[in-house]
Image: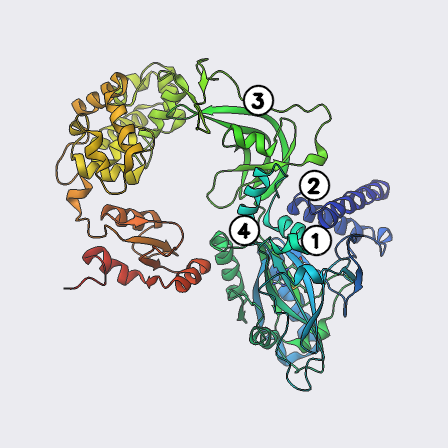
Amino acid sequence: MEDFDTAFKRVARLRQIIEEANVAYYLKDSPTISDYDYDQLVRELKELEQEFPELKVPESPTEKVGGPLSRLFTPVRHVSPMMSLDNVFSIEELKEWFQRVRRGALHLEASNHAEAEFVFEPKIDGLAISLVYEEGVLTRAATRGNGEVGEDVTANVETISVIPKRIKFPRGANHLLEVRGEVYMPIEAFKDLNEQQLVQNKPVFANPRNSAAGSLRQKDPKITARRSLSFWSYQLGETRGGPNFTTHVQTLEYLRDLGFPVSTLISLTTSETDVVQKINSLNEHRHDLDFEIDGAVIKLNDLKLRERLGTTSRAPRWAIAFKFPPEERITRLKDIMVSIGKSGKATPFGVLEPVFVGGSTVSLATLHNEDQVKLKDVRPLDSVVVRKAGDVIPEIVGPILSSRPPDSQPWSFPKVCPMCGGPLIRSEHESDHFCINYRCPGQIVQRIAHFASREALDIEGLGEQRVFQLVSAHLVADPSDIYKLKIDDLLKLDKFAEVSAKKLIDAIEESKSRPLYRVIVGLSIRHVGTTAAIKIASKVKSLSALLTVKASELSEIDGLGEIIANSVVCYVQDPVTRALVESLVQIGLGVATSSEVPGDNFEPILSGLSFVVTGTLESFTREGAEQAIRDRGGKVTSAPSSKTSYLVVGANPGTSKLTKAERLGVRIVDENEFLNILERGNLDKVG
Ligand code: IVH
């Protein structure tokens, strides 16, 4: 594909970039490129070295493990080399690996080929550690370093409570035992640490891996001790005088018996299809775990076969890492702008050089508010870490300070609204700025789009862009105007034909029968989301009654509170918003008929109960199940706590939710029991 000269230059450049990235990652615990980009560079280098074998050299990063060692720690030679893992990024590549392993195994031992067993493990995103026990006592802990020689971090590792300092020492066994695994920082601990860093005006860590590495590789172990580090073991290293094993699973059971934490997500299988399913399920549930993973590791179970397959200079042939798509990338922040929400909230966001992250191309990411921009010290033209995990909106984690342009200037919050030019006001004790002009076109579009959104009036075909089109054509200026739209009005606009116009008008008409609480959600009253709206609806029973409700009546409602009560009363007393409610009443929205008020439709039989739903249910979507709980007065939260009444478990549940519920003694119910609860209420109810 390339001529030798071009390849020669590119190989030299790639090696330089990779070595620089290694220094930032391994020495400074502060990467300058994302793991994903790093893997891509290594892959490109590998491919060029394959195409031009004369460019291969033993010092190439493709032949080596890890990076340079820090002078802060004493170098220690590993009992046996600590290797890395080869990566695959797709199921096709994984299948090729299976083939290579089976071919290797078949070639060496025909009878074993069909039955090859594989162990499936989460790939924990932390840092690899070797623990050496002599006569049952932890005598040395070392980082992986360059694979041959690591950094002595014994004193730091001794502060990690889940790592045994002494192990059972059966007579005549384990004169020396080496355990390998990953030191990591649980996600909650990482968030707490970053909050503290911010308060103390110190730089935040971009992710739990960096914070684990930065916390473990401290000169002063007292700092490590304060950092809530944890550990998973996944590999038995060198043993001298110890029991002999034939499979990897046996070694993991042995480690568990000795008191080492071994993940319950590890499982054994012979089927490739099963491995693929496990990969998909792990990827889907990766955010249910309280630690970060960046993929799965698949290992051959039979230790003899492993030995026969052997290793390359940097990784074993008997194991492979399947890397999940990246959730964090680094890209250029082109600018910081401000968006105006439905209640006028001004949210700063970054305009990015588009980047593929978390399964889609991202070009905008939130910066939350003025304080966050200041604390993170994010500036236009910085290189920034962008994170998009699961369903969460993309976020700018922080800048890469080492690549900041010399003339960079801090960003300051604009004084005026970018949509209407009115002032942006930040009140005392508030972290947000607001545009206070109710007629601001930015707010109008957001307010109407919210009114039509799924959680409110659910008007199909009336998304933000359509609303923008209608507002720009001066056809609508507040949510009640959409009920005045005629087919002919729409036909005058771009992108509307007879069918689409009729469809929208029908959808608008149909929305008139939505339950009262959804209309209340649609009003964009500050602090009033679905939960509060349901409570308000069951109290006032009709939209017209909302106009005369008193704050004292609302704050009587269990769990509503004064702030929400006052916000509702202010809303209905303000002439402008009051006029909107009156128009909606006139149109016939939110009337009290039994089928439209959730409190009348369903008995509040789950009131006082709190639920967490995990996994896939057969008769509900996740949202449907949660709505069914709320309809009956129950509460839904995202993770089990001591206050949770039930964990509802469907297929492929989140393991950490299950473990947490078990630990807290939360009652775990399957779909059938859940259906019973929806019908009859609390299972413990007498009678
Ligand atoms: S086994 C010779 N198992 O991934 C095989 N490694 O990218 C040694 N890692 O250096 C590693 N989870 O730090 C293994 N379940 C797991 C792992 C795991 C995370 C890390 C480890 C390794 C790196 C390679």
Looking at the image, residue 268 sits to the left or right of residue 133; the answer is: left
Q: Earlier in the sequence, mark 4 or mark 1?
A: 4
* Separation of marks 4 and 1 at Cα, in angstroms: 19 Å
Residue at mark 2: 32
* Disc 3 residue type (three-letter): Ser
Q: Nearer the viewer, mark 3 or mark 2?
A: 3
Residue at image position (30%, 52%) is: 610
Query: Picture quarter containing residue 201?
Result: top right
* Separation of marks 2 and 4 at Cα, in angstroms: 23 Å
Q: Earlier in the sequence, mark 1 or mark 3?
A: 1
Q: What element carries label 2?
A: loop
* Separation of marks 1 and 3 at Cα, in angstroms: 38 Å
Q: Nearer the viewer, mark 2 or mark 4?
A: 4
* Disc 2 residue type (three-letter): Thr
* Separation of marks 3 and 2 at Cα, in angstroms: 26 Å
Q: In the rendering, which numbered label is found on residue 140?
A: none
Q: Quadrant of the N terminus?
A: top right
